[in-house]
Amino acid sequence: MPTEKTHQKVVASFIELLETHRIEEITYAAIADNAGVKIEVVRACCNGKLDLLAAFMREIDQKVLKERDPDLMDETPRDRLFDVLMCRLDLMEPHREAIRNLRRTVVKDPALAMHMHKLVTRSMKWMLVAAGIEEFGLRNVGMSNALALGFERLVRVWLEDDAPGHPKVMVAVDDMLANGEKWMGRACRVEKVAAPFIEGLGRLCQRPLRPKGQSTPPSATANGGAEASP
């Protein structure tokens, strides 16, 4: 099996080629040549280009988590998430052209767009973790998906904002998080209202089912109706 270093070299080769080519134009032979490895090594490293994209995004996730400032936890959740998202965009900066080329294909390929949304959603789950915001179950799914949609819009702004410091991006991140706070507040209120109904439905689903046509509980039938006797 390839070493971690070789795997990283193959991923880096793919992203480097993506800076000047559309993803559909990149061949596995070109990835191997650019990485200085044999094509069978590329196969051993991945099942395809989507795997390489996933590995690249995982590397960005890990860098964000590694660079997380412990003092960040003293800030509000909104400020923490703002800093985390800006950190992620900063780490993406060296790969700006590769991401631009990827997006040119994504907007024309629904299947690739759906796959990329899954990858972004997975990354956003870890961005929430980096910001000290950890949820579970449906709330985690909802927050990760909502943040993924917002981040995908942010990337469009980021690609068009060439000004030093990306002031338009900072405004867009702030606006997105402000809107997210409003929606989360509404979701929490709905959750509180729905909680008793969900709990009741859960108890109903846990009740044992009676055999078809049986009108009395199984225990009463088994005792010959003794429970009904005076």
Image (spheres, rainbow, N blue to C red):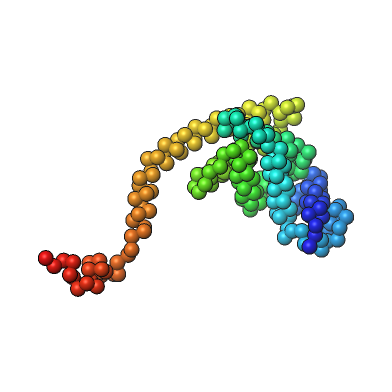
Q: Nearer the viewer, residue 97 or 53?
A: 53
Left or right, 35 with reference to 198: right
Counting the numbered discs, the total is: 0
Which residue does the image show at 65% across and 31% down from the upper left?
Answer: 71
Identify which residue is drawn at 24% across, 73% down.
222
Quadrant of the rendered image containing residue 85? top right
- Residue 81: horizontal and vertical position, in percent? 61, 34
Relative to 169, 227 lies left or right: left
Vertical placement of 71 versus 214: above or below?
above
Tell me what residue is drawn at x 86 percent, y 52 percent. 34
Give 104 or 139, whichever is nearer the viewer. Answer: 139
Residue 125 visible in rendering: yes
Q: Is residue 124 above or below residue 11?
A: above
Q: Nearer the viewer, residue 204 or 153?
A: 204
> Where's residue 113, x and y in %?
64, 49
Rendered residue at 67%/30% (across/down): 169
Residue 200: where, in percent of width, then height?
A: 34, 50
The C terminus, quarter of image:
bottom left
Q: Nearer the viewer, residue 193 or 27?
A: 193
Quadrant assignment for the N terminus:
bottom right
Q: Position of residue 206 (x, y in %)?
A: 36, 58
Residue 117 appears in the rendering: no
Question: In the displayed structure, would residue 45 be above or below residue 163?
Answer: below
Q: Is residue 227 left or right of residue 159?
A: left
